[in-house]
Amino acid sequence: CVSTPVSKSLTQKNLHSHKERHGGEILRIDGEKTYTVKEVAEILNRSVISVLQYIRSGKLETKKIGSSHFTTASALKSFAERQGFMVK
């Protein structure tokens, strides 16, 4: 389960665009909602390049679907806690 600040950030800023990209449906992996690299960058207040570096280094767990990376809510929460990030 994602902490409230992460959930609010996605709901208020990113949910509409996420739904548009996925035909009105939120992509779920193992029943969990997911976040794109861009959404993770916005939530963590980091650049997309930084998020991609976290993925390549194995610090942030993602699932690759086609050419896109998606991270689950629980993976994002775990990563943010381990790294000590304040999420917006």
Image (cartoon, grey):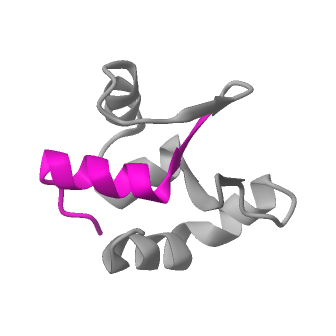
Quarter of the image that includes the N terminus = bottom left
Residue at x 50%, y 42% (from the top left corner) = 37
Q: Is residue 45 visible?
A: no
Residue at x 80%, y 54% (from the top left corner) = 22
Q: Residue furthest front?
A: 30
Q: Which residues are magenta?
A: 69-88
Magenta residue check for 42: no
> Which percent across, then down, holds residue 6?
38, 69
Residue at x 18%, y 63% (from the top left corner) = 86
User: Is residue 58 depicted above or below 15 in this figure?
Assistant: above
Q: Residue furthest right?
A: 23
Total numbered circles: 0
Q: Is residue 18 visible?
A: yes
> Which percent across, then down, holds residue 20?
79, 61
Direction from residue 63 to residue 83 in the image, left or right: left
User: Is residue 39 depicted above or below 70 in this figure?
Assistant: below
Magenta residue check for 70: yes
> Which percent across, then down, holds residue 29?
65, 50
Q: Residue furthest left?
A: 84
In this rendered view, identify the residue nearer to me: 86 or 1. Answer: 1
Direction from residue 27 to residue 54 in the image, left or right: left
- Location of residue 17 (image quadrant): bottom right
